[in-house]
Amino acid sequence: MTTHATHTSLGLDSRKMAFWAFIGSECLLFTSLISTYLVYKGRSVVGPYPHEILNIPFTSVSTFDLLMSSLMMVLALAAVQRGDMKWGKIWLFSTALLGLVFLGGQVVEFTEFVHKGLTLQTNLFGCTFFVLTGTHGAHVTVGVLWLLTLWVRALQGKLTVAHAMTVEITGLYWHFVDVVWIVIFTVVYLIQ
Amino acid sequence: MTEHSHPTSGVYLRVAAVLVILTVLEVGVFYVPAFHPVLVPVLLVLSAAKFTLVVMFYMHLQADSKLFTFLFGAPLLLAAVVMVALLFLLLGALTLRGAAGAG
């Protein structure tokens, strides 16, 4: 974790600029997965079908959880930027904890689906659903590990106000994971 | 093009409140039969509003350099165009194949 400020000729932080370019490429990845889901939507010839299996109340709670984790993340950034490391640590850990709760919910959901007979091989819905939400879950897992790493560094006193940009970039990743879920929740769960 | 200061914690909390309200509206609309004829457009608008709020305020694109907006917006626009094209192309092809099979 470096504190050296690396700026482009435009006066922008080069790490932040590179990360925005990465997020742009991630947009293309998730759009391709969402497109695949939509193209094959309603074309499964055997069940279980989405309306038989998707649990909207349960997923709504997961969505609320992820939205709140985004709030924790910006509060963590605000705390680190003003040098308040006590609250910075609390908010960083809260964000990671809410991320873990989301992942736990996804594990419960996937397990329930498998018990009801929906796997990657069952039908087109199962294949596209698990690939899309599984890829998102993998991104959440990376985000949680990243957040916990920052939290441990903060506990060790190695995360200071000088590392605010590192926290901001972590936040960009976390919020991107959140906006992808906003789209998935609408397209996959609510528009059946 | 410069990087500007970020919103205050109060702004973050107000945005979170709006996000929660929009999510409640989304789920509410899903369960109210009267909304079913316009369910898809209403849900897409609510989802787009949530997406925009997070990107503008939590990812700070509202105050940050326009270059960041371009780095995010250009691939997003490209992805949206490709998605619409794919849907027209493949949904049309699959429908035609289904019709041929039925015939």
Image (cartoon, coloured by chain):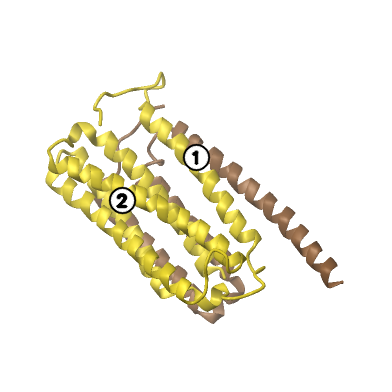
Chain colours: A yellow, B brown
> Which of the 4 quarters of the picture holds residue A106?
bottom left
Horizontal and vertical percent for residue A119? Answer: 52, 67
Q: Can residue A186 be spotted in the picture? A: yes
Amino acid type indicated by mark 2: Val
Identify the residue at the far top of this view. A9
Q: Mark 2, mark 1: which one is toward the viewer? A: 2
The residue depicted at 50 percent of the width and 61 percent of the height is: A130
The residue depicted at 36 percent of the width and 30 percent of the height is: A15
Find out whether the residues at labels 2 and 1 contact each other: C-beta distance under 8 Å: no
Horizontal and vertical percent for residue A147? Answer: 27, 47
In the structure shown, which secondary structural element does the residue marked by tag 1 occupy? helix
* Residue tagged 2: A144
Identify the residue at the far bottom of this view. B33
Q: Chain of mark 1?
A: A
In the structure shown, which secondary structural element does the residue marked by tag 2 occupy? helix
The residue depicted at 18 percent of the width and 39 percent of the height is: A82
Amino acid type indicated by mark 1: Gly
Q: In the figure, is residue A53 to the left or right of A125?
A: left
> Which of the 4 quarters of the picture holds residue A173?
top left
For disc 1, the neighbor class at 10 Å (few under 14, some 14 to 19, many from 20) is many
Earlier along the polypeptide chain: callout 2 or callout 1? 1
Horizontal and vertical percent for residue A121? Answer: 57, 65
The residue depicted at 38 percent of the width and 26 percent of the height is: A14
Q: Which is nearer the eye, A162 or A144?
A: A144
The dot on residue A24 is 1
Q: Which is nearer the eye, B26 or A3?
A: A3
Residues at marks 2 and 1, CA–CA distance in whole angstroms: 21 Å
B10 up-or-down from B68: above or below: below
